[in-house]
Image (cartoon, rainbow, N blue to C red):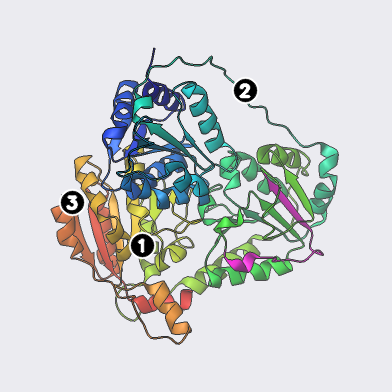
Amino acid sequence: MPKTADIIAQALHEEGVRHAFGIPGGEVLELLEAFRKTGIKFVLTKQELGAGFMAEASFQLTGRPGVLVATLGPGITNTTTAVAQALLDRSALIVITGEIATSLKPIYTHQLIDQESLLRPIVKWSTTIAPKNAFDQVRKGIAIAKGHPPGPVHFNVPTDVAGAEQAEARRFAPVAVSTLPRREELTVVENWLRKARKPLAFVGVGVQLDRAERELKRFIEAWRIPFVATYKAKGVVAEDHALCLGATGLSPVVDKIHMAHVREADLILTIGFDPIELRSDWIAPWDEKKATVNIDLAPNTHHVYRSAIEYAGSIRGCLQVLSQSAPKRAPSRWADPELERYRLSIQHALADNPQRGLGPYQVAAALRDVFPRDTIATIDTGSHRILINHVWRSHEPRRLLQSNGLGSMGYALPAAIGAKLLFPKRPVLAMMGEAGLDMVIGEMALLAHHKLALTLVVFRDDTLSLIRLKQQRMKLPSTGVVTGSPDYVMLAEAYGGNGFVVNSVPELKRAARAALPAKRFTLIEARIDPAEYNHQM
């Protein structure tokens, strides 16, 4: 009979999992061996935080659960930020922690904490794997992790249970059945779509979770409805599409422009639009007189915004039905010049040419010019992330990875490592501030070890610019916001990569073009004037 660890590994392999990330202790060695035999590659990281971000990125890129492995004590306590990331950014993550043998637990104290209780507030389900029926437990946990909204699940595995033999349960192959709304349920929505002169759609991560990108594209084209995407939904329809108006999320400058158009619109549709990505200004953005429709996988229980009509079910199915009822010719509304003025108003609000040195807008625009259309990019949290989301165009879904629901620093580098491990032939670009890189700097060792020729761009201003700006606006002195960071070129060379410092757009583009064909990783330090963020926040 198989061991418990073998049953866990086999269930994950059948889900399409091919990588697991973490740091082992003696309590998880049976699991690591089971992974090896099953064909799941275990990636040793430098800290559980980085491992969790790599695992979360693997879900974002593949739709298959990410796997984070940690040992007991400080191993599990180090996972908490990464687990919270998966919870608030809607990612299926399987967190597996080792624990001392059940026979020792009543009398032993070293490194012993209540591991289930520790993670229970930030996971969808936490369970200790039993010496019987492990297969059923694991299958249940995977189903919960993948259910809407996707999130983390915790398997606590005592050492004596991991190595114990047990019978596998009888296998089932359930078939998911997706229901469609009845036509009469959508009659009012169809009438609103026909009559609207200025409809506007706001699209969120739910479209990706339901794999409804194709249906969304057909719907907006059939009814000629321009759309705005949240940061994590960028690319659900390519951002160079004529009906794409860019992104919304955390920029007060950009949201001011969007809200002006919300007031003018005579029909608002929110499609998979999860408010976990949005600023507080999105609380009650319209009143009950506005014609509003919410289409999502689950009922609206957040009440951040309310809609006159709500459809909860298959986003794909609802959009299919609405597309079928569209006129043969798309309605003549929202003329192309009008949409172009909308887009340009956003770019004009953000664009800046600094008197000296480099501005963050210039860096983001130059990188988008150089890097190929199919690049997988990651961004760290900071002033630069808000700006980049409105400059970097995404042409596929899930190709601009970031921590947005949680907003954690230290995300970009581990996520880029996970991306390059999964897609070694794709160009991968990580954009970060120096503070975010410094938090996870040890993970750079994985780049040479795994021969990952990706590109890191550090927006260096030696300041926590967003926090400093808030201090200035509160008329407070700058306190605790100046960073003390190393020589990144020397650091890159020490870790086996190439390093450049750039102070102008031509220098940046030359370094970026040199990085693309390089056989080892490249770190580009772009010297930013922090004052350039002032008018963008």
Query: Counting residues from the N terminus, which is met first, the one under dot 2 or under dot 3?
Result: 2
Amino acid beneath label 1: Ala
The residue segment tinted magenta is 279-296
Q: State the residue position of label 1.
A: 366
Residue 487 in view of the camera: yes
* Residue at 23% in and 39% down: 450
Q: State the residue position of label 2.
A: 175
Amino acid beneath label 2: Val
Residue 361 is inside the magenta segment: no
Amino acid beneath label 3: Gly
Provide residue 298's location: percent of width, then percent of height. 68, 44
Q: Nearer the viewer, mark 2 or mark 3?
A: 2
Query: Counting residues from the N terminus, which is met first, the one under dot 3 or under dot 1?
Result: 1
**Disc 3, SS:** loop
Give the spatial CA distance, label 2 vs label 3. 48 Å
* Residue at 21% in and 65% down: 501
